[in-house]
Structures are given as structure tokens and as C-alpha cells.
């Protein structure tokens, strides 16, 4: 991880090397040692810094470790005797954190009834359609988990003529909540993409596009100021939302270095305060961009180096069985035949071309690709298996049903929709 000085052509920032022990700080500078018991830590609306982030900070930035929190982990929550909607949402977050979803996606609770009922029946579906809504009402469901978000684009009115808005109205009238996980299920370890690539057999699986650990801040502001300004600045920063102040570091007899951690939204107000009191007297202010550390095991797409290579024909047969389909579409890579061996395969559920493009593999497995995207893959010698969009995702619902059932009370029923199906079929 690198921190970039945004005011110095994005060069890596280095500071005087420091060593900390307890509350005592030793600073090496020109052969002399300075000791300080300064221990000011002001938290103003920002969480403690994740350990995954702190472990990669260049030496010299910190005077001593501050309280840390580890990267987000998935906890096994105790199974309560009753389940309110908010408690089910916590379980869903533990199974697949919504922070793993793509920035463009619309995930989470999309429809919330005015008077939510205790959740007794949960319906899983790949798409929320009119037949699925009728099934949910007939089964007396209190919660629909729709993999694809039925509400995606903003709208200015809620009317019957739009089929998606009509479904939202029906859900509200029936007191049914609607939740969508979408790309958080794709990204999470053990999620949709891991399930999809396992259809070809065991292998060494890696993430194609690595996810990043979410941080409560995006920038680090470093500055030096005279001692007479330090106390005044720290007092004023107590009212700043989303700003964390690290222990000040004594630079010399008259100046102290301070590191301020803030979010994107807090940066401008913070710099306004700093500018009023510091910049006018001292130009030593640096703005550093905080890089998010990788979230190991999570991200979009999977690449598997198979333990046992198989022919293209066998790969097609295995994927038909895995997806429960009688037909798949196959494009043979240039110079390949159905008897050619597949030693590596890249998979991405849904429309996977944007993730798979450029990945070196003998075989691509996804739901759909455009004509020209298939031609690009074939020209590189990569064969392509297409199942149609939702057919590459729907089978995971049964896997997730079992995972969710383990976390909910025994009297809560989790069922997979029988009315949900891909709109396309081979005729």
C-alpha cells in the first residue's frame, strides 16, 4: 500500500523514522533523541483504524499504535427464538456484507412495509416477477430475497403502469419486505462465482478482481504547527464530523506534527479549518490518499486451475449437470476441438465479459456475452460456454437456502421459488 502526496506529483511520502513503545516516543533526528509523553487521541465520529490498513503504513508516520479493528469478518450469530426483519437483515449482512457489492449496484432492503411482521417464511428468487409475487402471497411470505434488484433506476412516481413499480406496490400492500444482494453474493467467498466454477471440478481457485476492505476515511492530512496553535486546533476539531486525530509527534522545541484522518465528505471542511489556523503561518501541509487494502478471498470472477484437466466436451457435460440444463451454447477457441483439454477456466455469473476480458484461460464460463466479445475470446484460443444470464446464477439459491436456514430459528421456513425461471428457452 502506498500513500500519495497529492501536492507533490503523487510521489510516495517518507518521514523521519520513529519508534514507539507504550506512551513514550523516540524520534531519531541528527543523532539526537527526543522523548514525549504526548498521548492525545481525539475520535470525532470516525471508527478506529482497521488493522489491515495499519499494518502497511510506512514507518515514521505513527508515533505509537492506536486502537485497531480487524478487517470485517463474518460472525456466527446466535439463533434467536423469534426473528424480526431487522434481525434477518443482520444475518444476511453476516453471510454476505453489502460493502462487497459493486458501486453501481442497488443492494440491500429495497421495500420495507410500514408495519413489518415477524419473519416466518422467506422466499428466494433470482428475479422478482409477477408469478413470483403471486407465489409469495400464496405462501404467506414476509420477506422476498431477490438476487437481482427489482428496483434499480430512480423513479419520480409510484404507479401501476410500470411493472416493477406495480410489484413494489403489491409488496407494500401485502406487508412483504424485499431485499436484494446481487453483486455482494457474486463477490463474497463461497458465493455465486465460487459455486459456478466448482461445476467443472476441484482446482486452485483465485479471485480475478480483488475486493477492497472498506475504510471509514479516504484521506490523511499531515501538518506541522506551533505549540501555541496545537491546543486551539485540537479543541476546534472536536466538533468535526468524520475526523480522527492521531497522537501529535514532537518535531523540535517549537513545532509538532499532526496526522488527521477524514472521509471524502469531511476533507473540504477540514481543510477550511486547517487553512485558517495553520497554512497562513506554515506551508507544511500534505494531503495523502488512503489506499484500501485488499479483502482476501472476495471479489468479482474466479479463475480455477483444475486439479484434473478435462476435455471441452466433458466440461460442457459437467456444466449442464451443475446448472440443471439440457442445452448450453459453446464457442470453440481458435485451433481447439471438443476433445481439446481444459486446464484452466475463468467464470463469472451473469454477464461476465467485463470481468473475463483479458483473463488467460482455456475456457470462459458465464451467462451471456455479446457476439463481438465471443469473437475476441475465440481469437485468443479460449473456448466459451454460455448458459443465458440467470441460468448461471439460479442454482446458487439452493446453496444459499441451506446457509440461511442454519442461521435462522428452526420454525422459519426458507424456500426457493418454483415460479422463477429464465425468460429465454430453446425451442
Image: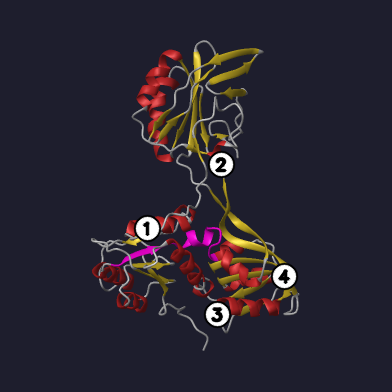
Q: Are marks 2 and 1 in contact (CB under 8 Å)?
A: no
State whether residue 87 is above or below residue 260.
below
Return the residue nearer the eye: 51 or 357.
51
Residue at disc 4, secondary structure: loop
Label placed on residue 381: 4
Pointer 2 or 1: first along the chain: 2
Residue at 52% from the left image edge and 86% from the top image edge: 426
Classify residue 34 as left or right of residue 231: right
Return the residue nearer the eye: 156 or 188.
188
Q: Residues within 10 Å of mark 3 (few under 14, many from 20)?
A: few
Pointer 1 or 3: first along the chain: 1
Label placed on residue 324: 3
* Front disc: 2 or 1: 1
Residue at 61% from the left image edge and 76% from the top image edge: 319
Label placed on residue 52: 2
Label 4, label 2: how far apart the Cα atoms are: 39 Å
* Front disc: 3 or 4: 3
Residue at 52% from the left image edge and 10% from the top image edge: 253
Magenta residue span: 176-192
Return the residue nearer the eye: 304 or 21.
21
Q: Are marks 4 and 2 in contact (CB under 8 Å)?
A: no
Say if the magenta span includes residue 335.
no
Label 2, label 1: how far apart the Cα atoms are: 32 Å
Pointer 4 or 1: first along the chain: 1
Pointer 2 or 3: first along the chain: 2
* x and y percentages locating residue 409 in the rendered image: 39, 63
* x and y percentages locating residue 422 in the rendered image: 47, 78
Q: Are marks 1 and 3 in contact (CB under 8 Å)?
A: no
Pointer 3 or 4: first along the chain: 3
Residue at disc 1, secondary structure: loop
Label placed on residue 80: 1
Label 2, label 3: how far apart the Cα atoms are: 41 Å
Amino acid at each position: 500500500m502506498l500513500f500519495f502526496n497529492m501536492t507533490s506529483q503523487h510521489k510516495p511520502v517518507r518521514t523521519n523514522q520513529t519508534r514507539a513503545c507504550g506512551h513514550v516516543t523516540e524520534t531519531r533526528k541528527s543523532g539526537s533523541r527526543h522523548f514525549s509523553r504526548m498521548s492525545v487521541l481525539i475520535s470525532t465520529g470516525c471508527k478506529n483504524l482497521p488493522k489491515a490498513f495499519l499494518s502497511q503504513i510506512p514507518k515514521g508516520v505513527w508515533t505509537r499504535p492506536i486502537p485497531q479493528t480487524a478487517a470485517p469478518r463474518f460472525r456466527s450469530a446466535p439463533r434467536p427464538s423469534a426473528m424480526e426483519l431487522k434481525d434477518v437483515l443482520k444475518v444476511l449482512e453476516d453471510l454476505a456484507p453489502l460493502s462487497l457489492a459493486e458501486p453501481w449496484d442497488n443492494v440491500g432492503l429495497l421495500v420495507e412495509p410500514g408495519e413489518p411482521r415477524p419473519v416466518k417464511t422467506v422466499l428466494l428468487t433470482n428475479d422478482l416477477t409477477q408469478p413470483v409475487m403471486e407465489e409469495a402471497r400464496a405462501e404467506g411470505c414476509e420477506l422476498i430475497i431477490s438476487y437481482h434488484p427489482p428496483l434499480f433506476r430512480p423513479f419520480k412516481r409510484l404507479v401501476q403502469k410500470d411493472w416493477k413499480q406495480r410489484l413494489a406496490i403489491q409488496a407494500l400492500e401485502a406487508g412483504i419486505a424485499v431485499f436484494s444482494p446481487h453483486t455482494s453474493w457474486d463477490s463474497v467467498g463461497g458465493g455465486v462465482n465460487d459455486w459456478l466454477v466448482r461445476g467443472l471440478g476441484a482446482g486452485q481457485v483465485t479471485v480475478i478482481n480483488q475486493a477492497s476492505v472498506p475504510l471509514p476515511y479516504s484521506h490523511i492530512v499531515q501538518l506541522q504547527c506551533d505549540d501555541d496553535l496545537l491546543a486551539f486546533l485540537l479543541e476546534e476539531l472536536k466538533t468535526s464530523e468524520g475526523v480522527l486525530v492521531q497522537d501529535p509527534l514532537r518535531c523540535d522545541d517549537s513545532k509538532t506534527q499532526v496526522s488527521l484522518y477524514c472521509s471524502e465528505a469531511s476533507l473540504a471542511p477540514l481543510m477550511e479549518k486547517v487553512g485558517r489556523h495553520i497554512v497562513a503561518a506554515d506551508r507544511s501541509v500534505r494531503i495523502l490518499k488512503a489506499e484500501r487494502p485488499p479483502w482476501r478471498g472476495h471479489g468479482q470472477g474466479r479463475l480455477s486451475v483444475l486439479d484434473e484437466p478435462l476435455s471441452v466436451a466433458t466440461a460442457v457435460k459437467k456444466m449442464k449437470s451443475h446448472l440443471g440444463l439440457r442445452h448450453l451454447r459453446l464457442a470453440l477457441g481458435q485451433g481447439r476441438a471438443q476433445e481439446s483439454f481444459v486446464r484452466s477456466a475463468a467464470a463469472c455469473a451473469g454477464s461476465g465479459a467485463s470481468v473475463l476480458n483479458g483473463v488467460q484461460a482455456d475456457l470462459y464460463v458465464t451467462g451471456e456475452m455479446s457476439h463481438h466479445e465471443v469473437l475476441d475470446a475465440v481469437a485468443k484460443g479460449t473456448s466459451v460456454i454460455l448458459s443465458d444470464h440467470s441460468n448461471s446464477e439460479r442454482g446458487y439459491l439452493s446453496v444459499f437456502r441451506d446457509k440461511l436456514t442454519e442461521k435462522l430459528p428452526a420454525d422459519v421456513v426458507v424456500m426457493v421459488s418454483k415460479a422463477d425461471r429464465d425468460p429465454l428457452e430453446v425451442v
